[in-house]
Image (spheres, rainbow, N blue to C red):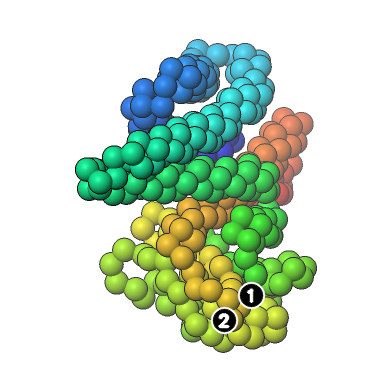
């Protein structure tokens, strides 16, 4: 997100993109502070890894500071900017080691819990008549620790899957590519029957949609649909914070082109919210005969909807910045041609005619 905002600002000079970069940088700083508070509880290795992350992110921010505020020539600016993607990718690669570190710590603690449980059972078998209450207490604590360790292991696996999906989505360059990657990534990450996304691009009155159902091909809806009766409209009408909700008969709410393969589906609907406005929904599809959605799936759907929101907005920002840059280049080329033509004019008639032609070309 920082890289996208900074590149957009470099292309367009839009101060809103600069503010977006600064806000994202501040949010990342808060996340990093939370990580540094957690690290001492996980041992010296975690503290070392957190320090590496801090050092690398500081290098990234220093480089961005030079780009934004340093007195650079155009050649120096281009040379520094070329180092950004490589630095960004290397930082992400180092951060990706953290899930495996946490997974290893979870496995170690789970083994410690099992060891304590075995020891406790042996001792309590000898003292069962005089310490029955202590046996029950220790067994209860051991089970609780084992359950918490298992939860930590599952959370680490979920976060690793989300991280892989985030890297996949970061490669999307068009709206169609982004929506296709979102539904396919949701199905793989959640081990689901299918997934469906609909959203309204900025400044557009119609909805776009995509779906992947029961291992078929991803369907992108080319004939765009209206807001009336859509899941997006329902999500906007909700009062209070936007919640992940379960909807029966989801096929009736989807376009006919997409609903054919989802006759008895149940949907877990997560709103796509940006700047306080709901602009679409992400839906996890499940056959009605299977088990209901669990708490963990609802939590993970919230993360996936945030990720989908980020990638769709990023693609829109990049597309807008590219169009503006192309228009600016066209304007500048027309003005240069006009200046060259006027420089060769010798009479008042030549000048006035050239001014009229140049005005048409430039606008």
- Relative to the observer, which residue lies in front, 4 or 213? 213
Q: Mark 2 points at which residue?
A: 288
Counting from the top left corner in percent of width and height, residue 132 is at 25, 48
Counting from the top left corner in percent of width and height, residue 85 is at 64, 27
- Relative to the observer, which residue lies in front, 257 or 68? 257
Q: Residues within 10 Å of mark 2 (few under 14, many from 20)?
A: some
Gap between marks 2 and 1 measured at Cα: 28 Å
- Position of 303 with respect to 355 (left or right) is left
Please say if 78 is above or below 20: above
Please say if 28 is above or below 47: below
Q: Mark 1 points at which residue?
A: 224
Q: Mark 2 or 1, which is nearer the eye?
A: 2
Residue at 50% across / 43% down in the picture? 153
Please say if 149 is above or below 85: below
Q: Which image quarter: residue 328? A: top right
Residue at 70% across / 34% down in the picture? 336
């Amino acid at each position: 997100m920082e890289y996208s905002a900074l590149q957009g600002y470099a292309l367009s000079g839009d101060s809103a993109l600069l503010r977006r970069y600064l806000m994202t940088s501040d949010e990342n700083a808060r996340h990093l502070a939370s990580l540094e508070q957690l690290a001492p509880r996980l041992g010296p290795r975690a503290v070392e890894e957190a320090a590496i992350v801090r050092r690398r992110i500081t290098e990234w921010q220093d480089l961005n500071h030079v780009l934004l505020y340093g007195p650079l020539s155009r050649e120096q600016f281009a040379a520094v900017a070329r180092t950004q993607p490589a630095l960004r990718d290397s930082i992400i690669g180092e951060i990706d080691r953290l899930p495996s570190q946490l997974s290893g710590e979870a496995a170690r603690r789970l083994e410690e819990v099992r060891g304590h449980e075995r020891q406790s059972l042996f001792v309590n078998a000898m003292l069962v008549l005089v310490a029955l209450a202590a046996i029950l207490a220790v067994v209860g604590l051991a089970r609780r620790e084992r359950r918490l360790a298992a939860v930590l292991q599952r959370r680490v696996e979920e976060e690793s899957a989300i991280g892989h999906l985030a890297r996949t989505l970061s490669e999307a360059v068009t709206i169609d590519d982004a929506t296709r990657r979102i539904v396919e990534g949701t199905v793989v990450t959640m081990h689901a029957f299918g997934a469906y996304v609909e959203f309204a691009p900025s400044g557009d009155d119609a909805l776009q949609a995509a779906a992947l159902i029961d291992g078929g091909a991803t369907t992108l809806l080319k004939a765009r649909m209206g807001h009336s009766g859509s899941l997006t409209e329902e999500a906007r009408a909700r009062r209070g914070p936007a919640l992940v909700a379960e909807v029966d008969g989801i096929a009736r709410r989807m376009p006919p082109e997409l609903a054919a393969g989802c006759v008895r589906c149940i949907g877990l609907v997560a709103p796509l919210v940006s700047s306080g406005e709901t602009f679409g929904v992400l839906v996890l599809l499940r056959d009605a005969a299977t088990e209901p959605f669990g708490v963990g799936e609802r939590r993970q759907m919230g993360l996936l909807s945030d990720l989908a929101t980020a990638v769709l907005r990023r693609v829109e920002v990049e597309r807008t910045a590219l169009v503006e840059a192309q228009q600016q280049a066209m304007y500048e080329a027309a003005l240069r041609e006009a200046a060259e033509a006027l420089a060769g004019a010798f009479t008042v008639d030549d000048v006035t005619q050239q001014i009229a032609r140049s005005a048409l070309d430039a606008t």
